[in-house]
Amino acid sequence: MNQTWALTEFSLGASLGEAVLCMQGRHLDQELTRIAQAIVNSPEVRFVPQLTETISAEHELCPVSAEAFYVLSGKKGEYSESDLAKLAILAQLTAKLLAAKAQLDQRFKASAEAQLQQSQILDQIHESVITMDLAGFIISWNRGAENLFGYSASEAIGKNILFLYDEEEVDGLRLFDSFLEDGGREMEVRRRKKSGEVFWASLSLSPLCDSNTQPIGMIGYLSDITERKRAEEQINHLAYYDLLTDLPNRTLFKKLVDKALLQSQRNHSIGSLLFIDLNRFKPINDTLGHAIGDLLLKQVAERFRLALRENDVIARLGSDEFAIGLLDIPQDIHAGLVAQKLLTTLDQAFLVEGHELRIGASIGISIYPQDGMEADQLLQKSDIAMFKAKRNVERASGSYAFYDNEMNRTIAGRLYLESGLRRALQHAEFSLLYQPKVNILTGQMIGVEALLRWNHPKKGMISPAEFIPVAEETGLILQIDAWVLETACEQARQWQAMEIAPFRIAVNVSAKEFTSTLPSRVREALTQFQISPAWIELEITESMLMHSAESVITIMDEIAALGVTLSLDDFGTGYSSLSYLKRFPINTLKIDRSFIQGVPTDNDDCAIAGAIISMAKKLRHKVIAEGVENWEQLSFLKDAGCDEVQGYLFSRPVSSDQITEMLTGGFHFSV
């Protein structure tokens, strides 16, 4: 073949390859026919993909496949051997190209079907499914991802996954590395949509591996959990924050303080806890209602918050109690300065729904690390210190006190007594002794005072002076007073059954018990034990008469109407108005023992005791002096006109059996 033919053959070969790869059907048949005619330079050549006609003996066939042929028309011998050789080579080349194309078509079809199937499956998944290569560049992006993020597949594919992050702190490449090592991971993340909206998503990542199990990328499944996260945050807020003031509650406060104390321990710094109890809040809340009380608490909380630093922690523990953590202070005295600042915020009146309200606070202070290493310990000790501050109020806005160990011992003792008092009521550890009251002229026992005694199972006899104040603070005094009244009435019934003439059993009444319900309770006791009212005398202290005198007189009148006598105890130690004293239905004035101790050597005591006796006589009241311990005191009182005496000169408090012996034996004291 000459050079011209070689070039022509190369050109026709390229055309053949292009035709086979790019054409099909009738167009391919026509192009192959054209190429064959050019090669043999005859219009009598054509490509036949399938023989459908009878080929005569004059035709030459060059097979391409079992069905396809190049056909030369005309008589044999009209074509040279060279033409036939060229046509044979063309047939072989065409056969190879068609076979290669068939294989490519088969592979392409399988790949296309797989890709179509994968795409259809991913698009049917409602979750967002994203695949990435190892560098984080997006390879696929399903319809769920389009709906979730707002980006189409064409917008997302090819970009790095980091463009969806909302300032994530985790380094992307390190994240992928950890996933590849661990084999997958689930987390809750924040992502950004095309609109700019940031949302919470549940993200599950797994590695993509090749046939050799080598990682080639990542596949991520995301679903929107924003509503669930909001619900969780709301529940968490309800669990850790006060609904009224939106301050941390006790649980969160202790967590925050404990966490900060660990830092203080590393820095060797000082911290402090302040326990705050509002003064005079309860009467405001009870009088004006809880709605006003709640608004007042919100204003108090806001004033406290504004007075503190950003890193200080303030919480509402409940009711009218707050706590503040000063978690990094230069020295412990700084806590006192903050307490003064907080009290100063209460100086100005609060305006609540048209009411001008004033309120104070008592603040207890504990110091870290000397008073404790944990929030619970510091809170407990600042609570103890608060009680000291409440007893030592120096100004209207309140007072504060630091915790000390002596205070802890005192409070611990009071708590021990409180728990013991509750047990004593349940286990009958109380008893009554009776101290005789003696007619100063005849020596006859004309009555007794019922005195409470507590026989503790471990500590033995405990003085009333020790446990009565605790009972009054805790409110247990109401149960104790009720027990004393019932026990005295029961004893009176026993003496009444012995046909002993009625005499007065004096029962002390606490300020808490002296309310409008007292007359009905006395009536019920008399009815329950079926005793004459002549058996009972109620001793009330002068301090009870200082407030609401009109209501006090009403209560006293109701008691007197029952036939029960009233005695004014500790007279001279209070501040009762003489204008009211003449209106009180009092039977007896009892001179306090503090005025008897100095008689007759102390001129002031003598003057006071004489004046009380003289005034009582003019008001037509009997007078009894308690604490009489010697004959000189008795002689002075007899000369001054005192009616009755009571004290160790005659008898200590004794049991009911001993009183019974005195009564039945006609015993008289020597006067």
Image (spheres, rainbow, N blue to C red):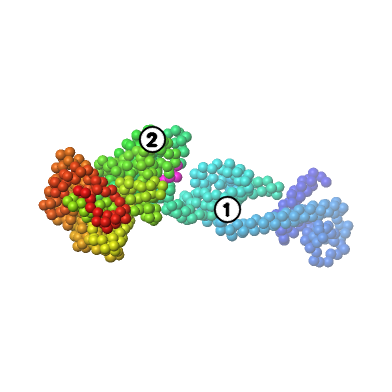
Q: Which disc number belongs to residue 481?
A: none
Bin the neighbour count of mark 1 within 10 Å (Cα to Cα): few under 14, some 14-19, many 20 and up: some
Q: Can you identify the residue that label 1 sits on?
A: 221
Residue in view at x 14 percent, y 49 percent: 641
Three-letter amino acid code at the position of disc 1: Tyr
Residue 654 x %, y %: 30, 51
Q: Can you identify the residue that label 2 sits on?
A: 329
Three-letter amino acid code at the position of disc 2: Ile
Q: In the figure, 236 relative to 598: above or below?
A: below
Mark nearer the viewer, 1 or 2: 2
Q: Distance between the residues labelled 1 and 2?
A: 49 Å
Q: Which of 197 and 646 is in front in this view?
A: 646
Residue 398 seen in the figure: yes
> From the viewer's perspective, is 164 left or right of 570?
right
Report the magenta stretch's main SS: helix
Q: Nearer the viewer, residue 604 or 2?
A: 604
Bin the neighbour count of mark 2 within 10 Å (Cα to Cα): few under 14, some 14-19, many 20 and up: some
Residue in view at x 63 percent, y 48 percent: 183
Image quarter for residue 445? bottom left
> From the viewer's perspective, is 14 left or right of 261?
right
What is the residue that sits farthest to the front in this orientation?
665
